[in-house]
Image (cartoon, rainbow, N blue to C red):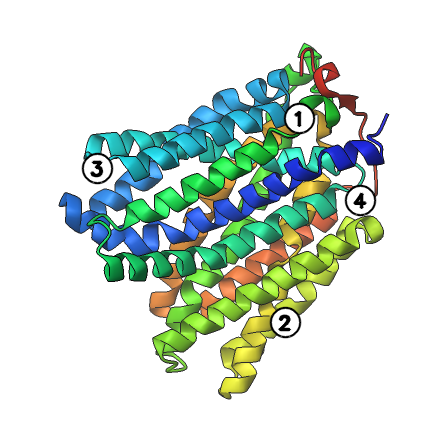
């Protein structure tokens, strides 16, 4: 039986916390490494190579741990309950990074933070559980808040840096950022605690050993996850090369190039909120088809010499990335409802790998052909859209769901 209006009302505060967690994830993603990297390296006498090696290595190790145990624990405990555990780890890691100055304690806290952050990827599945009747709306809204956080991250970091410099609060400027994030994470945890696993409809995990051992079962999760990883990579590759393109090819001053990227993300966020409001009114394949229409704007964005033309084109190009990832994830989470936890953690890993690979490829292209580097991301997005439309079933199928502990064997 689907949750009624009263169940949704009881989940309201927890849902706000879930969306806040998405925003926090965006803030952490863009607010730490960029603004504070130089100061951190200088204080602890680290090279940029050492930081560049340690950060992805920790992500791979704890991402692998999450893939190994995350889906099983999430289905056994219940995904919403497991998300609370992940946020506890995230909050503890952030608080540790804010409280400690010893490099080894900071490193240990960072590892806890990364583990909690990776395990909290299950929020994508939880939001599909909460909006089980219209998962596309829930996932799109969650990622709208993630995008808002990505824009807020550098702004929050810049504000704290100015305040710390003005007040001479402490010589470790990144600690203030971690402290603010830890407080936000704690508030998110309090909101999540207002909801219970029993109030959320969660598709029962497949308990048939024959299904899990069948040839192609893993590929049935990993191939869709790889598609989503490439979509995430296409978005980040364009965002990475665009400022340099506008500075070197169009001779835009750095601050204006940064503003162009901000406008691009604002259009992306606006599109996500729009598609989130559409909810189930538009079928997934139609949404994807609508999403790739603005890709054509990459042509004037790259070729036009008039600043007004290429600026507006690049800004509106953000619309093409608005609904693609969340819409496709929501559809795959419905098609693979019995393996939703495994799909979610697989997507977390393929996103990391896809972004790293696409940023590397686009950066290599940028050296030889800047226009080609700009076209790479949108072209890859179109290719992924074609694959989705060609091979993934459309429709509004609603998977069988169970309440709280009735999912899986003890979920």
Of the numbered discs 1 and 2, the one sitting upstream in the chain is: 2
Image quadrant containing the C terminus: top right
- Do the numbered discs 4 and 1 sit on residues whose CB atoms are within 8 Å? no
Camera-nearest residue between 15 and 368: 15
Residue 402 seen: yes
Circle nearer the viewer, 2 or 3: 3
Residue at 54% from the left image edge and 44% from the top image edge: 229
The number of discs equals: 4
Tag of residue 339: 1
Disc 2 is placed on an element classified as helix
**In the visual, does 254 lie left or right of 100?**
right
Q: Gap between marks 4 and 3, in whole Å?
A: 52 Å
**Mark carried by residue 394:** 4
Q: Residue at x 50, y 43 (%)?
A: 351
The answer to whether the residues at label 2 and label 4 have Cβ atoms under 8 Å apart is no
Q: Earlier in the sequence, mark 2 or mark 3?
A: 3
Frontmost of labels 4 and 1 is 1
The tag on residue 101 is: 3
Q: Which residue is mark 2?
A: 296
Whether the residues at callouts 4 and 3 have beta carbons within 8 Å, the answer is no
Name the outermost residue toward the bottom.
306
Q: Quadrant of the N terminus?
A: top right
Are discs 1 and 2 less than 8 Å apart at CB? no
The CA distance from mark 2 to mark 4 is: 25 Å
Q: Earlier in the sequence, mark 4 or mark 1?
A: 1
């Amino acid at each position: 039986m689907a949750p009624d209006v009263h169940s949704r009302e009881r989940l309201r505060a927890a849902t706000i916390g879930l969306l806040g967690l998405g925003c926090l994830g965006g803030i952490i993603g863009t607010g730490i490494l960029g603004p504070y990297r130089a100061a951190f390296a200088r204080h602890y006498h680290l090279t940029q190579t050492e930081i560049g090696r340690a950060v992805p290595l920790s992500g791979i190790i704890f991402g692998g741990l999450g893939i190994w145990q995350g889906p099983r624990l999430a289905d056994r405990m219940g995904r919403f309950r497991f998300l609370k555990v992940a946020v506890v780890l995230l909050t503890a890691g952030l608080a540790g990074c804010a409280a400690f100055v010893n490099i080894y304690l900071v490193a240990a806290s960072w590892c806890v933070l990364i583990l909690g952050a990776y395990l909290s990827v299950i929020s994508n599945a939880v939001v599909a559980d909460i909006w089980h009747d219209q998962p596309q709306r829930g996932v799109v809204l969650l990622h709208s808040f993630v995008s808002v956080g990505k824009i807020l991250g550098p702004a929050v970091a810049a504000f704290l840096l100015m305040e710390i410099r003005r007040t001479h609060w402490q010589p470790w400027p990144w600690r203030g950022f971690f402290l603010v994030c830890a407080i936000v994470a704690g508030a998110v945890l309090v909101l999540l605690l207002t909801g219970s696993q029993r109030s959320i409809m969660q598709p029962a995990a497949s308990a048939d050993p024959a299904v899990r051992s069948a040839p192609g079962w893993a590929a049935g999760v990993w191939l869709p996850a790889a598609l989503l990883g490439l979509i995430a990579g296409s978005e980040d590759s364009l965002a990475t090369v665009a400022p340099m393109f506008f500075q070197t090819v169009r001779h835009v001053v750095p601050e204006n190039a940064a503003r162009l990227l901000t406008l691009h993300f604002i259009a992306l966020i606006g599109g996500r909120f729009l598609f989130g409001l559409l909810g189930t009114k538009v079928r997934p394949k139609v949404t994807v088809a609508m999403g790739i229409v603005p890709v054509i704007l990459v042509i004037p964005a790259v070729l036009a010499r008039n600043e007004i033309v290429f600026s507006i084109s690049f800004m509106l190009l953000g619309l093409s990335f608005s609904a693609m990832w969340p819409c496709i994830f929501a559809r795959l989470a419905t098609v693979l409802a019995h393996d939703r936890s495994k799909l979610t953690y697989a997507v977390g890993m393929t996103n990391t790998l896809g972004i790293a690979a696409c940023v590397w490829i686009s950066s290599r292209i940028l050296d030889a052909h800047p226009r080609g580097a700009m076209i790479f991301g949108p072209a890859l997005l179109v290719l992924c859209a074609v694959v989705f439309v060609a091979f993934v079933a459309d429709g509004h199928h609603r998977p069988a769901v169970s309440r709280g502990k009735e999912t899986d064997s003890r979920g």
